[in-house]
Image (cartoon, helix red, strand yellow):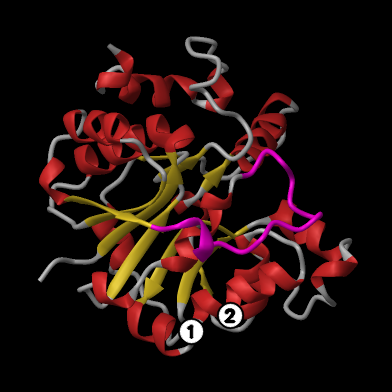
Amino acid sequence: MHEGTVVYACDDRYALPLTVSIRSLQENTPASLPIIVVSDGISISSRNTVLASVPRPGDIEFIDVGPTEFPHFGSGIPAKFSRAVFGRLLVPDRIIGTPRFLYLDSDTVVLSDVTRLLRLPLDGKTIGAVYDSLYTAYVSSTARLGAPGRTERFNSGVLLIDRERWFDLEIGPRALEYSRSHACLDQGGLNAICEREWQRLDQRWNRTTFDVLQQHRRLTAGRVTSDMTTYIRHYTADKPWIRPRLDRAELSHGVFLSYLDRTRWGR
């Protein structure tokens, strides 16, 4: 049996970074893992480019979801986000054939073997995720997301998921309903529903842009900083494919672009 299944969710706008993420995942993970892409209108052309750009295209399966399956956007959802962000909550249990699955945002670059992540203990929790200090501060000041219970909030861009608990507890449908009723993104719904159902993972498994910038400021100020080893780089604010070849060393755009050059998008 495979160590786990990897799940992505995106639309056609994010097909390029999706390709880079899958390429980096397969280059750094020797084992073959099933990859499910929850597609909100990814074109045939883009799908073909994805498949032609990665070492093991046979591992990839596209699952289409229709517009009626997504919640209606509320006034609290920024226009820059698409409904595809909710795709991680729409994964049907029938397509996951492993005890665990790993959800990755399309704007991630995988720099380590993810089977190491798939083997980490969850201590009886439904998901493993990385603490997000920026989102924690946002939630504490946002009344519509409800009174904060657990003070720590997680980033939903990298999720290690126990399949049985996820589907038995109906995490996806409940998080979708919360997101709809509170006019928030999937991350808000997941944090509310999984308040006591998440295990904190090492920061290296989801190194966000905010985290990278904070560490860079500490370094330039001559302050002691922690280990900046990165297993998964998550481009949460900076999107290196939007301004290609404009690299900021501290943001590791060059890492993304090096993988991009090895895909059909970069040729």
Q: Residues within 10 Å of mark 2 (few under 14, many from 20)?
A: some
Give residue 225's position: percent from left, percent from top.
63, 40
Please give the range of residues in magenta. 65-81
- Dot 2 lies on which element? helix
Q: Is residue 61 magenta?
A: no
* Pick the front one: 188 or 109: 188
* Pick the front one: 84 or 122: 84
Q: Residue at x 66, y 33 (%)?
A: 213
Position of residue 177 in the picture relative to residue 74 (left or right) = left
- Dot 1 lies on which element? loop
Q: Is residue 80 magenta?
A: yes
Position of residue 117 in the picture relative to residue 85 (left or right) = left
Instruction: Measure how far apart labels 1 and 2 are at the Cα level.
Output: 6 Å
Checking the image for residue 170, the label placed there is: 1
236 in relation to 167, above or below: above
Task: Inspect this view and state whether residue 64 appears.
Answer: yes
Name the dominant secondary structure of the magenta segment: loop
Q: Residues within 10 Å of mark 1 (few under 14, many from 20)?
A: few
In the image, what residue type sits under mark 2? Arg
Q: Quadrant of residue 196?
A: bottom right
Q: Residue at x 20, y 37 (%)?
A: 27
Which quadrant would the N terminus be assigned to in this image?
bottom left
* Pick the front one: 92 or 21: 92
Give residue 77's position: percent from left, percent from top.
74, 52
Q: Would you say the residues marked 1 and 2 are in contact, meaning their CB atoms lie under 8 Å apart?
A: yes
In the image, what residue type sits under mark 1? Glu
Checking the image for residue 174, the label placed there is: 2
Position of residue 170 in the picture relative to residue 91 (left or right) = right
68 in relation to 44, above or below: below
Please count the marks in the image.
2
